[in-house]
Amino acid sequence: MEIHRYEKIWIAITISAVILMLAAISLASFGLGLQLPGVAGSVDPAKLAQTPPFDKPGVYQITEGKYQVVMVAFAWGYNPNEVRVPAGSRVTFKITSRDITHGIFIEKTNINLMILPGQISEASVTFKDPGEYLFLCHEYCGVGHQAMAGKIIVEPKP
Ligand SMILES: [Cu+2]
């Protein structure tokens, strides 16, 4: 069977594009470590008040410049709904829901997570610039949904 010259060129271009795309995905996930925010475990939503770390939601300093925010989402709010960290901090959010499906989006960051009852969602971000970062629920969760928000206050370095 004879394949026309132009046909061969387009086949080559198409195969190259696929190889290039697979190489880019491999480089991003294995080379640069870019991953989707993952599921960090499971928890019984009915027993959050007795289950560490969700029995004490809050902001915890792990080491110099590293913080963990343990957060519980509920209809319609977050505990804590105000987080203070110094500029330059690396903050890991560990979040779950005590009732229904919620979400969290933190402006000016790449934090955008689903919050499901029974599941622990985790993601980290470094807050370089001082200022206020609004976060809000992006998953419709009932009549109080539009009021479900909070803020992260990044304070200038002392
Ligand atoms: Cu909501």
Image (cartoon, helix red, strand yellow):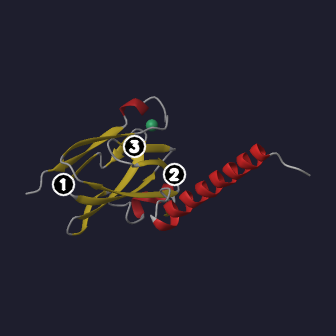
Residue 75 visible in the picture:
yes
CB under 8 Å between discs 3 and 2: no
- Label 1 crowding class (10 Å Cα cut-off): few <14, some 14-19, many 20+? some
CB under 8 Å between discs 3 and 1: no
Callout 1 amino acid: Ala
Left or right, 5 with respect to 110, comes to right
Nearer the camera: disc 2 or disc 1 = 1
* Quarter holding ligand 1: top left
Q: Specify the quadrant of the image occupied by residue 157.
A: bottom left
35 to 129, vertically: above or below: below
Q: 31 or 146: nearer the eye?
A: 31
Callout 2 amino acid: Pro
Nearer the camera: disc 3 or disc 1 = 1
- Disc 2: which residue: 117
Q: Is mark 2 within 8 Å of ligand 1?
A: no
- Locate residue 121, reporting x and y percent: 46, 56
- Disc 1: which residue: 87
- Disc 3: which residue: 105
33 to 145, vertically: above or below: below
* Residue at the image position 48 percent from the left and 67 percent from the top: 31
